[in-house]
Image (cartoon, rainbow, N blue to C red):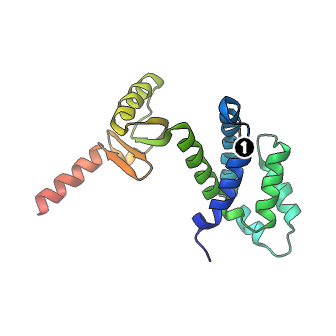
């Protein structure tokens, strides 16, 4: 079977073109709205139980579509429903998370920004996150869309992932470096 990234690319590009068709500020707003519902559908499609249900040969595409729409917490517009229908009818529901990731990548490229995930051992308040985001934007040289995920195993500090770049200032990473140095 082809790689999910290869399968997802044409869907993400087609969705990007249709969502940003207006161009300008209106197009960016449409892209942002589209990113919202695509991310939600991707989260739903990432559920193993749903994928198992969808893979059952006795279940129709319409039943899968109704289930996904029923689980969605936002009411989907016609373009979102049409997109979801095409994905389900082509048997590509498992590719939806990758479609969403590639769509975000295209949107970020247009906006000149990147997604950044900050892993922290402890919760980060809004003020501190704003300060961290400013420092990271200088470090990575671009606008960042920062999200935080707690990871207690880090012990302290943070680990930042921006695309394929990683900045790890966590206590766990420093302990690993010390362990390597002592065992060498």
Left or right, 83 with reference to 166: right
Q: Quadrant of the C terminus?
A: bottom left
Locate residue 133, reporting x and y percent. Answer: 42, 31
| Residue 178 relative to residue 13: left or right | left
Residue positioned 78% across, 63% down in the render: 88
Rendering coords of residue 44 (x, y %) = 70, 53
Q: Quadrant of residue 4?
A: bottom right
Q: How many marks?
A: 1
Using the rendered view, name the quadrant where residue 29 is placed: top right
Q: Residue at x 45, y 26 (%)?
A: 125
Residue 46 on image: x %, y %? 65, 58
At a point 77% along the width and 40% down the height, the residue shown is 74
Does residue 76 appear left or right of residue 151 in this picture? right
Residue 116 % position (x, y)? 46, 42
The N terminus lies in quadrant: bottom right
Q: SS for tag 1?
A: helix
Farthest residue toward the top?
127
Q: Is residue 161 left or right of residue 37?
A: left
**Could you classify mark 1 by the number of other residues whose Cα lies within 10 Å: few (under 14), some (14-19), or many (20 or more)?**
many
Q: Which residue is mark 1?
A: 19
Residue at position x 53%, y 44% in the image: 109
- Taking depth in this image into account, of 57 and 144 the one nearest to the observer is 144
**Which one is in front, 38 or 53?**
38
């Amino acid at each position: 079977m082809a790689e999910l990234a290869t399968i997802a690319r044409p869907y993400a590009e087609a969705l990007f073109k249709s969502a940003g068709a207006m161009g300008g500020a209106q197009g960016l707003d449409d892209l942002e709205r589209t990113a919202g519902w695509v991310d939600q559908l991707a989260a739903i499609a990432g559920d193993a139980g749903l994928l198992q249900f969808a893979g059952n040969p006795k279940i129709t595409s319409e039943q899968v579509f109704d289930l996904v729409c029923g689980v969605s917490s936002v009411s989907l517009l016609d373009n979102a429903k049409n997109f979801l229908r095409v994905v389900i009818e082509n048997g590509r529901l498992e590719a939806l998370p990758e479609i969403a990731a590639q769509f975000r990548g295209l949107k970020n490229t247009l906006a000149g920004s990147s997604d950044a995930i900050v892993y922290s051992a402890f919760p980060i308040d809004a003020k501190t996150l704003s300060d961290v985001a400013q420092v990271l934007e200088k470090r990575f040289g671009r606008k960042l869309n920062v999200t935080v995920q707690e990871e207690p195993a880090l012990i302290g500090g943070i680990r930042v992932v921006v695309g394929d770049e990683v900045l790890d200032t966590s206590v766990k990473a420093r302990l690993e470096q010390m362990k390597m140095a002592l065992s060498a």
